[in-house]
């Protein structure tokens, strides 16, 4: 065995990756390892492989490993049969602990000599030959194979058949099974609004749409379950609904990083933008690593599907050539050089009109102000989201006139928590989920465009932002012309900071920007902040409420308050 010595090397996590992921293109077992010295990655991998090798040889598995060096460490993955991935995770973790000399209590008695027999027995207990057989049957039939701990399915949507894992037959009957069109949408901001617009457009086109998102999973107007279903579990659930003929899958960073993609292939993949959010987490510590995670949806196109990309995002423009298949761009600028030079179809804002450009010709879709979620074209970020949704719909074969009708007919109420307007006591209340610098800047731009006698902002910030980022947000907020700021404590978002620490940073920066002390106040909860702002507001004023943890409850409060306001 080769020796490995490195300071500050420790195991962070061990888990299954159940689909294409940032480490490799297949399901695998992975260990995340903190490692201060990037130069030690190769020797660590070699020592780890030497522990794994004899075990895999005893199991009859070929040894195929992968390494993804990241800021602060490395992710090491090994391929194994999907019916024995839990065993593979145990092997991967045991091997790493053996290298580091830090065995855990459960595996402390497993020596190098005993490991092959120990894990051979474990793999035998987990083995499910019928699961592997079902995967081969699906591949032979040319249809998608989806599996998890509870269910196995072949085909997608209307063309799918699903079995409970214990009841899985061998062979599975794939007769009549087929796939349906599927689109995956990811990005730092705008993905939820984009998937809602896209689903509405597709319903206008006569489709029965399966939607997975950060707020719910459902089929057309039928909600299956509420909550964050933007991971692979949500995608698989929707693709097993037998009345769905097209799937719209919101695909968030967390699920991609923790488990990988929920589907092996998509017809269309869209990335709305890449910007700073959730940076600092292992595996997505910087923009380059975050882009690797988001780009997985494009990798799933396998050079056959269409990539929908934001031509105004420099990171996506730079990475676009990696996709050899067709592209559709969207942009807020008709004179964007990328669109001029690329020759691909593009959806752009030309003046005040959303247009489709193809080889130099332009077809007008509708006016931006005619799209309800743009709030009279003041919500420019939602114009960009509308362009993205239109581009994906086009790639799925929806005609221009249906795209326009869909954009024009989705009400603001169908986009809860995203740029929702209420009239309470003669004041306008804007409720939004914006929580990262780019999203908040977009919201502040919109607030600046909306007429108001006075403006009050209610917001807070998570403690994992840097001092500089928190101060920058405070400066950007004050620049829109505020008369009052109410800071919410957000105790569940302290993330390593002391109570009120974020508030004092915001307050100090606002005072440096010219705010008077009496213009800045502080509450424990978002509900208390909204209540204070509504009490302060008078007819003609604007209340800007940014909600992180209490958005649903605040929507209910504002709906009741609006209904009780005399017309």
Image (cartoon, rainbow, N blue to C red):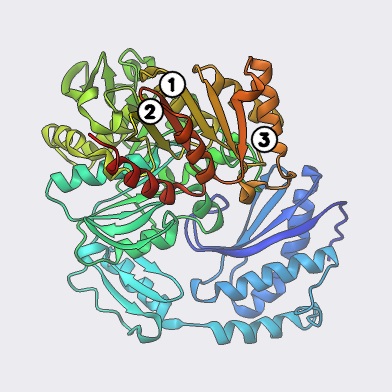
Residue drawn at x 54%, y 35% is: 459
Q: Which mark is residue 381?
A: 2
Residue drawn at x 48%, y 49% is: 550
Q: Earlier in the sequence, mark 2 or mark 1?
A: 2
At mark 2, the secondary structure is helix
Residue drawn at x 40%, y 26% is: 538
Q: Is residue 521 visible?
A: yes
Decide: marks 2, 1 in contact (CB < 8 A)? Answer: yes
Marks 3 and 1: which is nearer the front?
3
Q: Is residue 466 visible?
A: no
Q: Which mark is residue 503?
A: 3
- Expressed as whole percent of the image width and height from the top left, the position of residue 458 reads 52, 34
Q: Earlier in the sequence, mark 3 or mark 2?
A: 2
Marks 2 and 1: which is nearer the front?
1
In the image, is residue 388 above or below residue 58? above
Q: Which mark is residue 412?
A: none
Residue drawn at x 70%, y 50% is: 74
At mark 1, the secondary structure is helix
In the image, is residue 15 above or below residue 475? below
For residue 37, side relative to residue 371 (left or right): right
Q: Which residue is mark 1?
A: 445
Name the one closer to the observer, 341 or 223: 223
Pick the quarter of the image with the C terminus.
top left
Tell me the quarter of the picture where residue 90 sits.
Answer: bottom right
Q: CA distance from mark 2 to mark 1?
A: 9 Å
Q: CA distance from mark 3 to mark 1?
A: 23 Å
- Expressed as whole percent of the image width and height from the top left, the position of residue 371 reads 23, 30
Decide: marks 3, 1 in contact (CB < 8 A)? Answer: no
Q: CA distance from mark 3 to mark 2?
A: 27 Å
At mark 3, the secondary structure is helix
Tell me the quarter of the picture where residue 304 sits.
Answer: top left
């Amino acid at each position: 065995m080769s020796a490995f010595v490195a300071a500050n090397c420790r195991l962070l996590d061990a888990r299954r990756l159940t689909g294409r992921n940032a480490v490799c293109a297949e399901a695998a077992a992975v260990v995340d390892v903190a490692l201060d010295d990037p130069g030690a990655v190769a020797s660590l991998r070699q020592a780890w492989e030497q522990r794994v090798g004899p075990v895999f040889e005893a199991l009859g598995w070929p040894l195929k490993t992968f390494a993804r060096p990241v800021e602060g460490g490395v992710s090491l993955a090994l391929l194994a049969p999907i019916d024995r991935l839990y065993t593979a995770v145990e092997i991967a973790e045991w091997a790493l602990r053996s290298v580091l000399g830090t065995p855990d209590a459960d595996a402390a008695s497993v020596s190098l000599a005993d490991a092959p027999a120990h894990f051979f027995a474990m793999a035998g207990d987990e083995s499910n030959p019928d699961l592997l057989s079902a995967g081969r049957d699906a591949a032979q039939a040319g249809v998608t194979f989806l599996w998890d701990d509870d269910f196995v399915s072949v085909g997608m949507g209307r063309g799918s058949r699903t079995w409970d894992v214990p009841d899985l037959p061998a062979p599975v009957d794939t007769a009549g099974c087929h796939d349906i069109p599927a689109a995956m949408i990811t990005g730092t901001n705008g993905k939820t609004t984009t998937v809602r617009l896209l689903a509405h457009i597709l319903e206008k086109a006569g489709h029965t749409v399966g939607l997975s998102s950060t707020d719910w999973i459902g089929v057309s107007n039928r909600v299956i379950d509420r909550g964050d279903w933007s991971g692979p579990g949500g995608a698989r659930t929707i693709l097993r609904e037998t009345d769905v003929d097209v799937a719209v899958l919101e695909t968030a960073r967390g699920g991609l990083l923790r488990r990988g993609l929920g589907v092996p292939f998509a017809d269309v993949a869209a990335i709305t933008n890449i910007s700073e959010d959730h940076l600092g987490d292992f595996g997505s510590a910087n923009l380059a690593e975050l882009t690797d995670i988001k780009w997985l949806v494009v990798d799933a196109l396998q050079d056959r599907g269409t990539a929908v990309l934001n031509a105004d995002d420099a990171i996506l423009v730079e990475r676009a050539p990696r996709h050899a298949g067709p592209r559709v761009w969207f942009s807020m600028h008709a004179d964007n050089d990328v669109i001029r030079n690329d020759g691909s179809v593009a959806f752009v804002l030309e003046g005040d009109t959303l247009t489709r450009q193809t080889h130099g010709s332009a077809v007008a879709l509708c006016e931006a102000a005619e799209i309800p979620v743009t709030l009279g074209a003041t919500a420019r970020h939602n114009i960009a989201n509308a362009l993205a949704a239109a581009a994906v719909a086009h790639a799925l074969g929806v005609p221009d006139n249906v795209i326009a009708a869909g954009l024009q007919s989705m009400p603001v109420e169908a986009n809860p928590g995203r740029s929702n307007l209420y009239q309470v006591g003669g004041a306008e209340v804007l409720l939004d989920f914006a929580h990262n610098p780019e999203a908040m800047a977009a919201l502040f731009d919109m607030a600046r465009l909306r007429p108001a006698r006075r403006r009050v902002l209610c917001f807070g910030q998570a403690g994992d932002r840097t001092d500089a980022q928190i101060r920058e947000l405070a400066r950007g907020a004050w620049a829109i012309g505020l008369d009052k700021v109410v800071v919410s404590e957000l105790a569940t978002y302290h993330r390593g900071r002391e109570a009120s620490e974020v508030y004092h940073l915001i307050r100090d920066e606002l005072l440096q920007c010219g705010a008077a002390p009496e213009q800045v106040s502080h509450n424990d909860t978002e509900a208390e902040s909204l209540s204070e702002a509504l009490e302060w507001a008078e007819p003609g004023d604007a209340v800007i409420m940014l909600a992180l943890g209490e958005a649903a409850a605040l929507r209910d409060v504002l709906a009741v308050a609006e209904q009780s306001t005399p017309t």
